[in-house]
Amino acid sequence: MFSLYKKEIQSFFYSPFAYVLSALFMLIFGFAFVGRIVNMETSVFQFSFPDMFYNNFFYFIFIIPLLTMRSFADERRGGTEVQLLTSPLTIPQIVLAKFFSIVTVFIFMLVLSLFFPIYVSFHGTVIWPSLICGYVSFFLWGTTCIAIGMLISAMQSSSIIAAIIGEIIMEGFLTLDLIGASKMIESNPRLNSVVTWFSMQRRFVFIAQGMFRLEDLVFFLSLTAMVLFWIVLYIEKRRRSHN
């Protein structure tokens, strides 16, 4: 499993791919950061970062499918899928190796973004508990989206199509807050509870504000595990078709 994980990491960092996406992530974060400074009413930096993540979900969400689109689609397109599926590794090991490699790149991006709160700490005040909660919440959101993106990639032979479908699905999750706030949904308490239960942004806000509710942690962790399990089942089905 580690050998495949290492190979996947090398495929990211031995090419410009990871660095281009990291630069895009930093660019989005940088624009949000500068925008907050421009709109500040005082000359002292004193703000938390979770709202910067929340207000820019629409832009950050474009990066995740780009990270995951090649995970399985490129194996099929490049003709290496059979070799991978007939390797000594089990399907769960293959899926986890690819998942952890993408999560590692995601963590790399988050570490780079620490430049901004560190900069603020030298020129103003950083609300560290809020910052930590924001990063934990954003990490949980990101890992769930990574699992979803991998599932789409496993079902496609084109990485471009996988990225497009992944964007559409993740944007769908992003609009749940707006749908839940509509008058038609609000007027139906049961339907509203169903819609808001699937809202990842709502759960992000609770964790980012330091309200670590068990149901929110269970939601992110269980949804990620469930999607990874679906990937294992789908890849196992493809492995049997090659036998």
Image: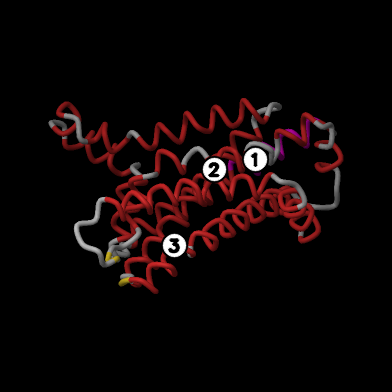
Q: CA distance from mark 1 to mark 2?
A: 22 Å
Q: Which residues are magenta?
A: 230-241
Q: CA distance from mark 1 to mark 3?
A: 41 Å
Residue 132: x %, y % from top left: 39, 68
Binning the other alpha carbons within 10 Å of mark 2 as few (below 14), some (14 to 19) or many (20 upward) gives: many
Q: Position of residue 90 (x, y in %)?
A: 76, 51
Q: Viewed as shown, does residue 121 lie left or right of 73?
A: left
Rendered view: 101 above or below 234: below
Tell me, yes or no, whether the highlighted magenta stretch contains residue 141: no
Q: Residue at x 33, y 60 (%)?
A: 207
Kind of residue sitting beneath label 1: Leu
Mark 3, residue position: 116
Residue bearing mark 2 = 64
Front position among marks 1 and 2? 2
Residue for point 78% across, 29% down: 77
Between disc 3 and disc 2, whose residue precedes?
2
Q: At x 62% / y 25%, what residue is drawn?
A: 161
Q: Amino acid at mark 3?
A: Phe
Q: Give the residue pinned by disc 1.
A: 233
Viewer-nearest residue: 123 or 9: 123
- Quarter where residue 66 is shown: top right
Query: Which quadrant holds the N terminus?
Result: bottom right
